[in-house]
Image (tube, rainbow, N blue to C red):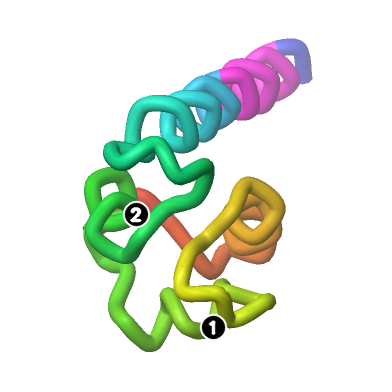
Amino acid sequence: MKKLAFTLAFGLATTGMVFAQSMTELDADGSGALSLEELQVIYPSATEDTFVTIDANADGAVDEAELTAAVEAGTLTTDS
């Protein structure tokens, strides 16, 4: 049981680090949100349809809240 708890905690911590890097390091143009091309650096399987789906306010960019919601819903994964 302790091993499972450690594995889950480590996985969550690692996911958080990747997510933290995604908004600060992947925002190449410094806009505060991600374009499809910026998003595909860490989520290479993201398509234009996926992007439109997660862009909840339809402003043509994915902000931190939209990215968080998509990751938590499993819409975005780092698997290719």
Q: Which residue is mark 2?
A: 39
- Crowdedness near tag 1: few (<14), some (14–19) or many (≥20) residues, C-alpha within 10 Å: some
Q: Which residues are magenta?
A: 3-13
Residue 5 on the magenta span: yes
Q: Which residue is mark 1?
A: 53
Compared across the picture, whether 59 is left or right of 52 comes to right
Compared across the picture, whether 64 is left or right of 25 comes to right
Q: In the image, what residue occupies the spot 45% across and 27% down?
A: 24
- Where residue 28 appears, as percent x and y from the top left, is 28, 38
Q: In the image, what residue occupies the spot 31% across and 41% down?
A: 29
Compared to residue 26, the image places residue 9 above or below, namely: above
Compared to residue 56, the image places residue 74 above or below, namely: above
- Where residue 21 appears, as percent x and y from the top left, is 44, 25
- Where residue 13 appears, as percent x and y from the top left, is 61, 19
Mark 2, secondary structure of its residue = helix
Q: Taken as a whole, is the magenta stretch helix, strand or loop?
A: helix
Towards the viewer: 31 or 45:
31
